[in-house]
Image: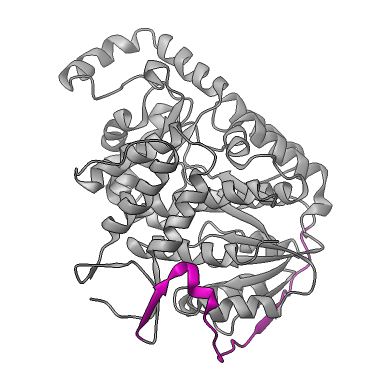
């Protein structure tokens, strides 16, 4: 059994089992939702139905139950002693973390700009592009409202009067580059391996960025990081944004460790990004549009009929079939750990909103990040998605847009995290295509496979 210090999965029969913990946590959430527990099927298949069930039968208390289960099941190991994550920050330590302060060397950027397709969009050009995305069903109308709010209030960009704690500050999808350029005050937490990237982004910006020395591991220095963040509390409003990411079970451990920090900072605003490869209750307008597109396929339906028949109806199924409003983007290849880590962040957003805290939870579009490009099947599906009316964004475009929505949310707080997420979702078109996502995924992958072999994005 692994005895390494840090936030860990609990031991089951001498092994730290990600599946056992994930099943237990989601079962507790199902119980709070009044739903039956998952069966004894293969967890890598069963978790998909569990998450769909949770999404469709959400109820007050589900987020609280899920988070309580996370904090009860995961553990902190320190000096050979194991305790529940819920008690991790009760640990006292004489160790203190040093501070590295980087002041940006550039002039502050005072307007919202978005790199897109070889151009830098600003002002009316950006408005036209966003309007085009709305018209094409790539984003929901609330997304355009959010961008317009920031365009009309460029003074918001510097986030004056706030200090932003970025957990996973070096993440490819994180807002550090934009916040630093806009002159924000940032506390950046990430591994030592990300130190050079974090400091480079800080230097090319115009704000002040503080890091714990040359980086710190959230998993192993959780109590020290909590104390260090407290040392930098100067009375300004605190925002904690979780952008942590890792492969496999480490992603859940990081999401849980970040959540422990957020829970211990009850006065702070909370921010995170939702993923398109999850499931959501779609707005009525998106459901109607997807059904309209299904009914108006014209001659295309004749070409699709043999595929549907040969696959016994598994391919090209209609979206939102049977009256369901579930925008189901769950992808089995990403696995239960990724899905649970992202659900922890959604639960925290729901809980924080219920507690009266300001929340920024926005759905980022499908984006060609490094983690996607390393996964050949997923990358092939992304490349082929354009044949189904789905737009895959470049990382730089997504970062700028999501940072803008973060700024808007901190100045115009949404009233309910999940409702705001749905109404301003940048899903890339996934919620409005006429097909259930997984029923088109294989065909999209086949269409994109030749380009994936050539390394095209």
Q: Is residue 85 magenta?
A: yes
Instruction: In this rendered view, identify the residue nearer to me: 333 or 440.
Output: 333
| Label total for image | 0
At a point 77% along the width and 41% down the height, the residue shown is 149
Quadrant that contains the N terminus: bottom left
Q: Quick check: 429 left or right of 441?
A: right
Give the image location of residue 347, x and y in percent. Answer: 51, 49
- Residue 326 shows in the view: yes
Q: Which image quarter: residue 126? A: top right
Percent x, y of residue 25: 37, 53
Which of 207/58 is in front?
A: 58
Residue at the spot x=18%, y=16% of the render?
Answer: 309
Q: Magenta segment: does it hold 344?
A: no
Q: Could you say which quadrant of the image residue 131 lies in?
A: top right
Residue 52 drawn at (x, y percent): 38, 35
Q: Which residue is at 42% across, 17% downward?
A: 323
Who's the residue at 59% across and 89% down the image? 96
Q: Magenta span covers which residues?
A: 80-109
């Amino acid at each position: 059994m692994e005895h390494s210090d840090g936030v860990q999965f609990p031991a089951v029969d001498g092994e730290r089992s990600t599946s056992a913990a994930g099943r237990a946590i989601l079962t507790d959430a199902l119980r709070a939702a009044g739903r039956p527990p998952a069966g004894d099927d293969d967890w890598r298949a069963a978790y998909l139905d569990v998450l769909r069930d949770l999404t469709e039968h959400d109820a007050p208390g589900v987020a609280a139950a899920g988070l309580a289960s996370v904090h009860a099941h995961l553990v902190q190991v320190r000096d050979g002693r194991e305790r529940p994550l819920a008690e991790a920050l009760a640990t006292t330590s004489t160790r203190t973390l040093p501070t590295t302060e980087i002041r940006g060397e550039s002039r502050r950027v005072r307007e919202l700009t978005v790199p897109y397709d070889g151009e830098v969009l600003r002002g009316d050009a950006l408005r036209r592009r966003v309007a085009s995305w709305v018209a094409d069903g790539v984003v929901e109308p609330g997304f355009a409202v959010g961008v317009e709010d920031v365009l009309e209030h460029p003074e918001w960009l510097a986030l004056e009067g706030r200090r932003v704690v970025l957990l996973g500050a070096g993440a490819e999808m994180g807002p550090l580059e934009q916040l630093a350029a806009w002159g924000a005050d940032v506390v950046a937490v990430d591994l030592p391996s990300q130190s050079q990237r974090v400091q480079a982004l800080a230097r090319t910006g115009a704000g002040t960025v503080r890091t714990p020395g040359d980086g710190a591991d959230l998993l192993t220095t959780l109590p020290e990081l909590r104390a260090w963040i407290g040392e930098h509390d100067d009375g300004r409003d605190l925002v904690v944004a979780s952008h942590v990411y890792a492969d496999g079970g480490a992603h859940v451990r990081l999401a849980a460790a970040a959540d422990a920090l957020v829970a211990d900072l009850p006065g702070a605003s909370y921010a995170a990004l939702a993923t398109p490869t999850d499931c959501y209750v779609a707005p009525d307008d998106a459901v109607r549009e997807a059904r309209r597109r299904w009914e108006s396929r014209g001659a295309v339906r004749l070409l699709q009929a043999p595929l549907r028949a040969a696959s016994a109806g598994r391919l090209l199924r209609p979206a939102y079939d049977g009256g369901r409003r579930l925008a189901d983007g769950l992808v089995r290849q990403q696995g239960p750990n990724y899905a649970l880590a992202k659900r922890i962040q959604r639960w925290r957003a729901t809980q924080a909103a219920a507690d009266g805290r300001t929340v920024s939870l926005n759905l980022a579009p499908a984006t060609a990040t490094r983690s996607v490009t390393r996964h050949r099947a997923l990358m092939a599906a992304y490349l082929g998605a354009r044949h189904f009316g789905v737009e895959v964004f470049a990382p730089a475009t997504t970062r700028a847009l999501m940072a803008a929505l973060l700024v808007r949310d901190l100045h115009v707080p949404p009233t309910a995290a999940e409702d705001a997420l749905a109404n301003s979702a940048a899903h890339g078109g996934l919620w409005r295509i006429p097909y259930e996502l997984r029923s088109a995924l294989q065909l999209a992958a086949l269409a994109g496979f030749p380009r994936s072999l050539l390394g095209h994005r």
